[in-house]
Amino acid sequence: MSVASVIHSETDFDVRKIREDFPILKQQVHGKPLVYLDNAATSQKPQVVIDAITRYYTLENSNIHRGVHYLSSQATMAYENTRTILKDFLNAASEKEILFVRGTTEGINLVAQSYGRTFFKEGDEIIISAMEHHSNIVPWQIVCEQTGAKLRIIPMNERGELLPDAYEKLFTPRTKFVSIVHVSNSLGTINPVKEMIAMAHCYGVPVLLDGAQAVQHLTVDVRELDCDFYVFSGHKIYGPTGVGVLYAKQELLEKMPPYQGGGDMIRSVTFEKTTFNELPYKFEAGTPNIVGGISMTAGIRYLQSIGIEAIGAYEHELLEYGTEVLSSIRGLRLIGTAKNKTGILSFVLDNVHPHDVGTFLDVEGIAIRTGHHCTQPVMQFFKVPATSRASLAMYNTKEEIDILADAIKKVMKVFS
Ligand code: PMP
């Protein structure tokens, strides 16, 4: 029996119907039904996203913002409409606060280079956490090199939870910025970001949230959180690669210089002087990923049609099931056991290297990720070279978790 044909959760969540919307899930890998558990690396795409890409190139393709002809105005309208959808999705105050970027990585680099390079100076301090993805470490290290600022790190405990008291102690009059991950990609921890933002604001310090692993699982309301910057990638929220969003408060964007120069971001250019375009275009130099923006929002609308709360609840049920099943395997240690988690099951096995686990599971048709997950400091903290990580999405099932558990037991037998 195929995985798709056996699923029925206790909840009303109709996983079988959802799986039908993702054509890639129907295929076999190495003669076995594909069990795709690498969603934190990238999610699969529903048919509506694939259709949006095809429709764009079939009917709408044209460069935006510059043309007066029919196709250009159609493409411009479609693209700008996606900005409004994204504004509503994050509950931002205005479309001026929604910038299209290449993804989370570019969004953070933009803030580091535009805000950080302008406002940090020698001796200033930037707070990040012990569980950051490299893309929320390296851009800050680069701007520290350029300005003489220093990084301060919020520590975590053995469950993979940040320590609030230690966080508060890091604030000094030199603290100029906080940049933290909303949900950890290697541990699954959901950080108490609302409280952390409120604390930073008590010290007058702006906060960036890396939402790459959050927006697809939790409702994010940037005004309720009161974050100053929020970034995420389209490809982890059922959209295409190469496009993402940077939300920023308008008052901050007004003060920040452009990140890149080129077409579209200018008002007028002479050899003597250039004046910049209004927000958000001041930060969007060159032809953007038009089809990416349009199809990313097709993915977000799809997710909204199912309901982010229903998705979160279903994924939580899967996480609890997966935690129970994997914890019962002798010789398996879960890495990342925070009380508040999304569907990340990172683990190590006694005497088996994670890369061997990944290779063995692949033969069984199971896609997981092995390695440091771009969080080498997390691996150093837990004293492991790497982990195996199964990461869940709305289309995964308990049966797939059983298939994973059986395959892990087989690996252990082979290597024992
Ligand atoms: N931050 C986190 C928490 C992530 O999981 C990722 C992707 N693994 C990134 C940042 C970087 O995202 P991207 O490669 O899409 O820019």
Image (cartoon, rainbow, N blue to C red):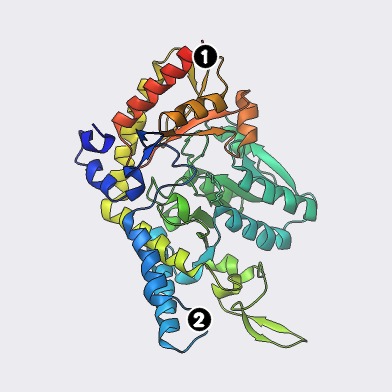
Which residue occupies the foreground of this view, 174 or 17? Answer: 17
Q: Would residue 145 be seen by someone viewing this image from the given angle?
A: yes
Q: Quadrant of the N terminus?
A: top left
Image spot of residue 183 (x, y percent) = 48, 41
Kindly identify the residue that appears in the image at 38 percent across and 46 percent down: 218
Q: Quadrant of residue 106?
A: bottom right
Kindly identify the residue that appears in the image at 67 percent across and 73 percent down: 261
Image spot of residue 202 (x, y percent) = 57, 49
Q: Earlier in the sequence, mark 2 or mark 1?
A: 2
Callout 2: CB less than 8 Å from ligand 1: no
Report which residue position mark 1 lands on.
415
Which residue occupies the extreme top position in the image?
Answer: 416
Report which residue position mark 2 lands on.
65
Kindly identify the residue that appears in the image at 32 percent across and 59 percent down: 48
Image spot of residue 244 (x, y percent) = 50, 59
Left or right: residue 37 compared with residue 228: left
Which residue occupies the foreground of this view, 159 or 57? Answer: 57
Which residue occupies the foreground of this view, 19 or 335? Answer: 19
Secondary element at image label 1: helix
Give how far apart the Cα atoms at labels 2 and 1 are.
59 Å
Which numbered disc covers residue 14? none
Q: Is residue 65 above or below residue 212?
A: below
* Kind of residue sitting beneath label 2: His
Residue count near mark 2 (Cα–Cα under 10 Å), binned few <14, some 14–19, many ≥20? some
Number of marks in the image?
2
Kindly identify the residue that appears in the image at 56 percent across and 68 percent down: 251
* Kind of residue sitting beneath label 1: Phe
Which residue occupies the foreground of this view, 200 or 181? Answer: 181
Q: Quadrant of residue 7?
A: top left
Left or right: residue 318 compared with residue 71: left
Secondary element at image label 2: loop
